[in-house]
Image: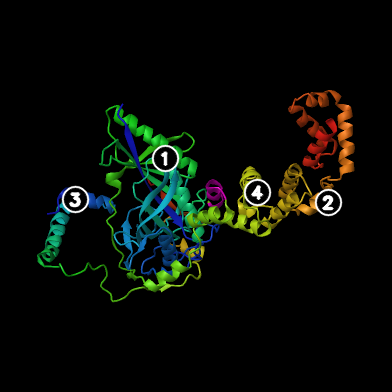
Amino acid sequence: MITIAEVEHVALLARLELSDEEKKTYSDQLSAILEYAGMLDDLDTGNVSPTAHVLPLKNVFREDSEGAHLPLEKTLQNAPDRDGNFFKVPRIV
Amino acid sequence: MAQYETVIGLEVHVELKTNTKIFCHSSTRFGGDPNTHVCPVCLGLPGVLPVLNKKVVEYATRVGLALKCSIAQYSKFDRKNYYYPDLPKNYQISQYDLPLAERGYLDIDTEEGIKRIGITRVHMEEDAGKLVHQGTISTTPYSLVDYNRTGVPLIEIVSEPDMRTPEEARAYLEKLKAIIQYTGISDCKMEEGSLRCDANVSIRPVGSDELGTKTEIKNMNSFRSLQRALRYEVERQVEALEEGGGIIQETRTWDEAKGITLSMRSKEEAHDYRYFPDPDLVPMVIDPDWVEEIRASLPELPDRRKERYVADYGLPAYDASVITATKELADYFEECLAGYPNAKAASNWVMGDLSRLLNAGNLDISQCPIKPDQLAGLLKLMDNGTISGKIAKTVFEEMFETGKDPDLIVREKGLVQISDEGAISTAVDDVLAANPKVAEDFRTGKEKALGFLVGQVMKVTRGKANPEMVNKMLKEKIK
C-alpha cells in the first residue's frame, strides 16, 4: 500500500504539485501497480541472475574522436531564458 | 573527557584526459566560450542516445589496476536522479551496484610505518555543468548555466573508512594523486578541479567497533585545506558530543577564508536518488585479454620506483619518496642522472635549490627553465673542480633565470675556480699581512680564526679560489 505521505514524497522529488484528490488517486493507482508487479515475488528465481537489460547487446562503444558541436543559436533556441551565451535559470536554493 | 577515535573515508573524483565526452563526440577542451562544446546528447535533448567512449573504460581500468582492484567482468551504468540545473537530463549517468573496479588498496607512509588503505570501488560517471551565481548561491536573483563540462568523463574512487587522522587522509590523497598521474589518465590538478575530494568523517569512543554518525565535507581545494577542514570538523564533532548534543548526518562545506565547516543541507531529504539501470546503455562485458593488455601497459608506479631508487641508486628512503611523488619530477631526476651518475648529489640539488626556486616562482617541474642535462652539466663542473660549490649556487640561479648552459655562464662571467698555486699563494699572503692578529689567534689554538681567514681569501678572489687549497695553504703558511 502506497501511503499519501509516500505519494507526497515522490511528488516532491519529481517537482510535481498534486491536489488532495490527485494524491488519493495516485496512492490507489501506484498501490495497484506495485501489487500486480508483486506477483513476481511468488516465483522461485533462485537460479535466475538479475537482469538489468533485456536487449541481447553488450559492449557498444564509440572511438574517442571529436565531432561537430551544436551552433550556439541552436543550443539556446528552446531555452526559456538566456543571458549572452548562458542558459538563465531561477535561483536553485 | 572521553577519548575519541576519528574515522575518515574519502571520495575522490578525477577528470579523465580524453578528447571527447563520455557519451558523445563533444570536446572536453577547457576554455571554450560557454555552451559551445555541446551537442544534443550532452544537452539531454529528447530522443538522443548516449554511446560509451571506449577510452573512458580503458582509462578507468588503468586506474583500477594501478590501485590493485579486481576489474568486473560484467558492469553497467545507472541513472542517479536529482533535480538540479547543472544536469540537463535531471539525472546523472553513473554506476551504482556494478562498478567497473572493486576491492583495491594503496599504501601510505605514516609515523608508525606503512599503512594500507582499502579502496572500495572505482566507477565511471559523467560530470555536471557549471552554474554561475551573482553573489552567493542563496541570494543570487538567478543562475547562469554553462554545459561545456556536462558529460566530461569522471571516475569516482571511494576509499574504505580506514583513515584515522587528517594527516593520514592527506597522505592517502597525495599517494592517490601520484598513482593516477603516473598512469597518465588525468592532470589531477586540485586547483583546476580535475581532482576533487569529499570526505566522510565521524568519531567514536576509543575501543568502539560501531561507526558514529558521519558528516560529508565538500569544497576542499588543496591538500592543505583537506587537512585543515578535517581537523576543524573532528574538533567540532568532539565538542558537540561533549556538550551532550548529537551529530546530524549532513553535508557541510569548507569555508577556506573562515577556516570552518558550514551545514549545507540535511542529507535524508535531499538524497533520494532512485538509481535504476540506464536503459539507453547496454552492459559491458569486459574482455580479460583486454584487461591484461592494459595491465601490461601500466608504467612503473611510485612505490616500485621508490624501491628502485633505494636499491639501485642508494638513495635514502626519504629522498626517494620526495622525488617519486610526481612522475615528472622522477623523470627529470633520471634524465639528470643520465649525464651525471652521483644520485645523492643530484637528489640534494633537485630537492633543495631546484624545488626552492620552483616553489618561489610557483612553477611546475615541467616549466623548469633548467633542463635536466643542464643540471647534470653544472654538477660535473663542480665535481671536476672547474667551479666551487659556492659558485655553483650562483651559476645555478643564473641558469634558472636565463635558461643558459652552465659552461656558458661560467665563461661569460669568468667564474672558473682558481686552482693555480701561485695565484692563491699571493692572495693568502695578502690576507695574512692584513690580519696578523687573527693569524696569531689561529697559531695559539683558536680553530675558528681559520674560517675567518678562508672567508677573507674567498672575498679577495671573489669566491673563485679553490677552498681546499686555500685551507691547506693557510695552515702551512701560519705554522
Magenta run includes residue B319: yes
Magenta run includes residue B362: no
Disc 4 vs disc 1: which is toward the camera? 4
Q: CA distance from mark 3 to mark 4?
A: 70 Å
Quadrant containing the N terminus of chain B in the rendered view: top left
Q: Is residue A17 visible?
A: no
Q: Amino acid at mark 1?
A: Pro
Disc 3 vs disc 2: which is toward the camera? 2
Q: Chain of mark 4?
A: B
Q: Amino acid at mark 2?
A: Arg
Q: CA distance from mark 2 to mark 1?
A: 51 Å
Q: Secondary structure at mark 2?
A: helix
Q: Residues within 10 Å of mark 2 (few under 14, many from 20)?
A: few
x, y (%) of residue B210? 25, 41
Are labels 3 and 2 assigned to the same chain? no
x, y (%) of residue B246? 27, 33
Residue located 72% across and 47% down the image: B396
x, y (%) of residue B270? 30, 47
Q: Is residue B365 visible?
A: yes
Q: Horizontal placement of B215 versus A40: left or right? A: right
The stretch of residues the image draws in magenta is B315-324
